[in-house]
Image (spheres, grey):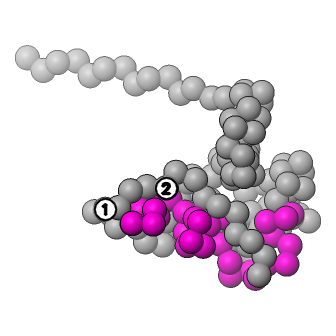
Amino acid sequence: MPLPKPAPADHVYLDDMQTEALADAAGEYRVFILLLAYTGLRWGEASALKVGRVDLDACRAHIVEAYVEDNGKLYLDTPKNHARRTVPIPRFLAEELKPHVEGRDEADLLFTAPQRGRCGPGTSDSGSSPRPWPRRASAT
């Protein structure tokens, strides 16, 4: 006799105060946390987002690529379901994103790991363990 399937767990969402507390606790990664929380971007989409795909005047991010994992390897691909889309950015977040965008090349990743590469799994100095947070890329 097959066992019954367990009921899926309910999704848990942070409220505004919890989101703000998490972002503040993340220190220099505050804006990255807010971007994930208030746009609904997936980690792979946010970590692949380039400066030129962020339109602060229109408060929009153009999602055209994402990092995906296949057999332990990360590579750039189209977003989930191959669906490019434009995502609204709240005005307060667009203001916080300005220092991450202004004066930077359009081809630069918006957020990078400490060695200026992509952020996400496998970006530690040894390349063998995940680095959980991206680092804001400095203007060059």
Q: Amino acid at mark 1?
A: Gly
- Give the residues drawn in magenta, as a range: 98-127
Residue 138 vertical placement versus 88 (above, below): below
Residue 128 sits in which quadrant?
bottom left
Instruction: Determine the residue positioned at 78% across, 27% down.
Output: 17
Instruction: Determine the residue positioned at 77% across, 81% down.
Output: 140
Q: Are marks 1 and 2 in contact (CB under 8 Å)?
A: no
Residue 90 location (% of width, % of height) = 84, 49
**Magenta stretch: includes residue 111:** yes
Residue at mark 2: 131
Residue neighbourhood size for the residue with mark 2, other residues' Cα within 10 Å, grouped as few (<14), some (14–19), many (≥20): some
Is 83 placed left or right of 61 in the picture?
left
Q: Amino acid at mark 2?
A: Arg
Residue 109 location (% of width, % of height) = 65, 72
Q: Residue furthest left?
A: 1
User: Which is closer to the viewer, label 1 or label 2?
Assistant: 2
Q: Secondary structure at mark 2?
A: loop
Residue 102 sits in which quadrant?
bottom right
Task: Give the main secondary structure of the magenta stretch.
Answer: loop
Residue 42 location (% of width, % of height) = 57, 52
